[in-house]
Structures are given as C-alpha cells and as structure tokens.
Amino acid sequence: MKNTVQVGDKREYRRVVVVNDVAAFHGEVVHEVCATFSLARDIEWTSRQFVLDMCEPDEEGIGTFLSIDHKSPAFVGDEICYIAVVEHIKGNELICSFEANVSDRMVATGKTGQKILKKEKIARLFKH
C-alpha cells in the first residue's frame, strides 16, 4: 500500500442527476428525485479515488461500510458535487466523511469505510 494520502485530503466528483438515478423499484418510480442508492454509488466512487491512489498493482479496495444522511432532494438535471475527506487511516483501513451538495444546498452527508487488501485475499474471500 502506498502512503500517498493523508488525513484532511479531499477528492471531488461532480455528476448530473439523470432519469436512471431516480427512486424506482422494480420498474415503478416512487419519486422523481435522486435516490439514496444512486447517491451511494457516487459517494463510493468519490472516496474510491483515494483507494486508487493508495493501491499497489496487487491490491484492491473493498468497502466496509457506508452511512448516508439524505437531507434534501436532488432533481433530474441538478449537478451534485460530492466531496470526500480522509478522516482516518489506520493500517489498511481508510475512513472518509463526505458531503453532497447542489449549489449551496446540502443533499447528503455521511461516512465511508474501505480496506485495502491483496487481490489474492479478496479472491479467496469471494470464492464459493
């Protein structure tokens, strides 16, 4: 694992909400706003940017937790700005806080956890 990331480092990702991001289950739209599960995907991608910087070629990141406080809606066409901040690095564990905003409106906050493991170990864990 490369020691390229420090507590306080930030990564940003921007994405425009599209129709496929709305809250829908089994083909039925519940709300025409960005779903919490769509936020989760983009939040994970934002904090993964740290993992990509930290991994050696024989390593990969694996998510350990995701906590989201969904505070306000993001509508189709809105651009969400995701910002992840490194809160804690201990051994191979990376904990980030994040916020997601549309302009000056907070959409979500929370935390992510990831561990960096050898690819061979992940393959053993996923073997069934």
Image (cartoon, rainbow, N blue to C red):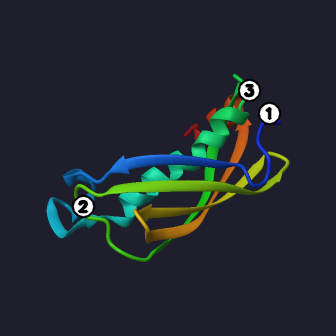
**Which of 104 and 55 lies nearest the eye of the viewer?**
104
Q: Which residue is mark 3?
A: 56
Q: Is residue 117 above or below residue 93?
A: above
Residue under the point 32% across and 72% down:
73
Callout 3: 10 Å neighbours few (<14), some, many (20+)? some
- Between the C-alphas of marks 2 and 3, the distance is 36 Å
Q: Which mark is residue 96?
A: none
Q: Amino acid at mark 2?
A: Val
Q: Secondary structure at mark 3?
A: loop
Q: Secondary structure at mark 2?
A: strand
Q: Secondary structure at mark 1?
A: loop
- Between the C-alphas of marks 3 and 1, the distance is 5 Å
Q: Which mark is residue 22?
A: 2
Q: Position of residue 127 (x, y in %)?
A: 58, 37
Q: Amino acid at mark 1?
A: Met
Q: Position of residue 78 (x, y in %)?
A: 29, 58
Q: Which residue is mark 1?
A: 1
Callout 1: 10 Å neighbours few (<14), some, many (20+)? some
Residue 126 seen in this snapshot: yes
Q: Amino acid at mark 3?
A: Glu
**Dividing the image into 4 quarters, which one contains the N terminus?**
top right
Residue under the point 32% across and 64% down:
35
Residue under the point 73% across and 26% down:
56
- Between the C-alphas of marks 2 and 1, the distance is 37 Å
Whether the residues at callouts 2 and 1 have beta carbons within 8 Å, the answer is no
Whether the residues at callouts 3 and 1 have beta carbons within 8 Å, the answer is yes
Q: If you read the primary sequence from the N terminus, does the residue marked by circle 2 or circle 1 appear first?
A: 1
Q: If you read the primary sequence from the N terminus, does the residue marked by circle 3 or circle 1 appear first?
A: 1
